Image: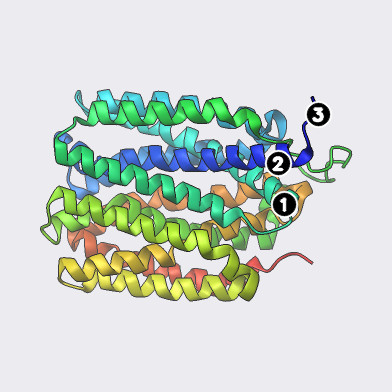
Amino acid sequence: MIISIDQHLRAATRAVYLAFIFLGVAIATFASRIPQIRDALGLSPSQLGLVLLAGAIGSITSLPLAGRVVERFGSRRTVIAMALTFGLALSVVAVGYRFGVLPVVIGLYGYGFATGAWDVAMNVQGAVVERRLGRAIMPRFHAGYSVGTVAGAVLGAGAVAVGLSVTWHLILVVVTSVLIVAATAGKFGPDETDPAEEKPAGSGIFTFWREPRTLMIGVFVLAFAFTEGAGVDWISVAMIDDYGTSAAIGTLTFAVFLAAMTIFRWYGPGLLDRYGRVPVVRALAVLGLGGLLLFALGGHPAVAFAGAVLWGAGASLGFPVGMSAAADDPAKAAPRVGVVASIGYIAFLGGPPLIGFLGDHLSVARGLLAVGVLLVISFVLSPALKPLQ
């Protein structure tokens, strides 16, 4: 039986969507239960920030080498291995939080390590599919991730409402998600668009860390990763602690933030094709800043809820557009995506403790104003995203 190239491409496209979707489901499942884990461990905002830092350290450990790992073993095997590692790590968190902080820190380190390499590998494969299709699709893959996060957040709100334990909730959802990804990633296509193409000269591990454009894209992605990650980690906590809402309303606000990101990521390719990368991401940076100000300074849960919608919309396209820009040259896509992702994930390293520290001295909502500084930086650096000629 002869299988056409189009069939292979469609299968690879579906597999990439599933890798993005179920990573989102798994991450949001954990994020939706952060307030309950925080309460069980009796942590202050700054202590919670330091515990969440373990996941960021895990990501920073894996990301600098992730591009080379993908080059050596391929995105397919990397995603499968990291999905299984991810499931094991969050299972440790699911059980370990009952016994103290140390098991949670260990589990979160493994969670972050797996997330970093999984993220690079699926973005490399997404860029391959995008080039083979000949049209923008990367934001829609990231929309798939956002769909997954919305689903995970809604399931989380339901689990909180019905009193399902953190342990059973995390194990059931996360293990199911990673097994689906491990079973379907075999449909990924070859990472090299042209197998006969020679590897670029001077492609040592540090070469791509010296490229000005790659570094500027990395800092741009860092700004948007901080914007997105701060919302994921702290929106529900801020609604509960600073606005006095119930846990279910706090989780619902988190879900609405993710829904706004999802919608804009799905329709983003049309905007990018019509107006170009730079004008679109600049407009979204302004929109995100406006939403952030409403959330932090609105003074009422309804205003904060509306701010979360605008914040999510503004945060939507920065990360996927940055990944596409890093992968503009197919021959150098994997190491450049690795560099950009490494820089971007610094946001997850510094973000939780920074917001936690500010939350202790101001409030979590006011501490989130730090995100606005990075949105201004992203506006300034956006010209680096122009496609390579």
Q: Residues within 10 Å of mark 3 (few under 14, many from 20)?
A: few
Q: Report which residue position mark 2 lands on.
A: 9
Q: Which mark is residue 133?
A: 1
Q: Looking at the image, is 226 positioned above or below residue 17?
A: below
Residue in front for this viewpoint, 273 or 100:
273
Q: Amino acid at mark 2?
A: Leu
Helix or strand or loop: what does disc 2 sit on? helix
- At 65% from the left and 38% from the top, the residue drawn is 12
Name the quadrant containing residue 273.
bottom right
Where residue 388 appears, as percent x and y from the top left, is 75, 64
Is residue 206 at all visible to an observer of this figure?
no
Q: Position of residue 2 (x, y in %)?
A: 81, 29
- Name the residue carrying label 3: 2
Q: Residue at x 26, y 41 (%)?
A: 156
Q: Nearer the viewer, mark 3 or mark 2?
A: 3
Kindly identify the amino acid type of the residue bearing the numbered disc 3: Ile
Indicate which disc, 1 or 2, sits on the residue closer to the N terminus. 2
**Is the C-beta separation of discs 1 and 2 under 8 Å?**
yes
Q: Quadrant of the C terminus?
A: bottom right
Is 171 situated left or right of 80 in this image? left
